[in-house]
């Protein structure tokens, strides 16, 4: 069985940091992901369909996300889906799905961010083809579907 999720989106509200009983940091945030693969209804713009996905990240990466990401930051996350259920205030059972993130990548910082995102390190000067890998492509913000 395979349960693997890769998403790129914008953080829609400031991340919230908590700690487990053992002191491990946990950050929760909501990611807005545009769905450009859905077939639009007649007269509908295909880029207007947005999914809002709750995400959780544990450990040192949670503190890093909390430090450098705010509302509007664009990040990529990898992880797995987790299902949960709870009883709401109206005594109705509700089911939720969230992403338990294993990792994340900075894509852009929020204009509200007052700290610099850490440098990702030096760029590999050797082309991928010479390493035996696939060719790399230059991707600009105009190429992204959101």
Image (spheres, grey):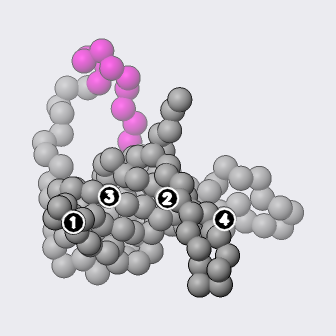
Q: Nearer the viewer, mark 1 or mark 4?
A: 1
- Determine whether, in the image, residue 103 is placed left or right of residue 4: left
Spatial CA distance of label 1 from label 3 is: 16 Å
> Which secondary structure, mark 2?
strand
Label 1 to label 4: alpha-carbon separation: 38 Å
Mark 4 in CB contact with mark 3 (< 8 angstroms): no
Neighbour tally class for label 4: few under 14, some 14-19, many 20 plus, Cα within 10 Å: some
Of tags 2 and 4, which is closer to the observer? 2
Give the structural element (helix, strand or loop) at label 3: strand
Q: Which residue is mark 2?
A: 98
- Give residue 92's quadrant in the image: bottom right
Q: Does residue 115 appear in this view?
A: yes
Neighbours of disc 2 within 10 Å: few (<14), some (14-19), many (20+): some
Query: Circle 3 is placed at which residue position?
Result: 57
The earlier-in-sequence mark between 1 and 2 is 1
In the image, 32 versus 5, the foreground residue is: 5
**Total count of labels:** 4
Residue 133 drawn in magenta: yes
Camera-side residue of 129 and 16: 16
Q: Is residue 76 left or right of residue 88?
A: left
Q: Quadrant of residue 51?
A: bottom right
Q: Nearer the viewer, mark 4 or mark 3?
A: 3
């Amino acid at each position: 069985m395979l349960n693997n999720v890769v998403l790129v989106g914008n953080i829609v509200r400031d991340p919230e940091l908590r700690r487990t009983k053992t002191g491990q940091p946990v950050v929760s945030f909501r990611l807005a992901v545009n769905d450009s693969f859905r077939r639009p209804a007649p007269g509908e713009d295909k880029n207007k369909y947005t999914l809002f996905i709750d995400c959780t990240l544990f450990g040192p990466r949670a503190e890093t996300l909390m430090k450098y990401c705010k509302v509007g930051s664009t990040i990529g996350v990898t992880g797995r889906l987790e299902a949960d259920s709870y009883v709401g205030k109206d005594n109705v059972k509700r089911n939720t799905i969230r992403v338990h993130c294993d990792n994340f990548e900075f894509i852009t910082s929020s204009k509200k961010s007052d700290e610099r995102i850490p440098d990702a390190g030096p760029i590999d000067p050797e082309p991928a083809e010479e390493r035996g890998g696939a060719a790399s492509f230059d991707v600009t913000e105009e190429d992204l579907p959101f």
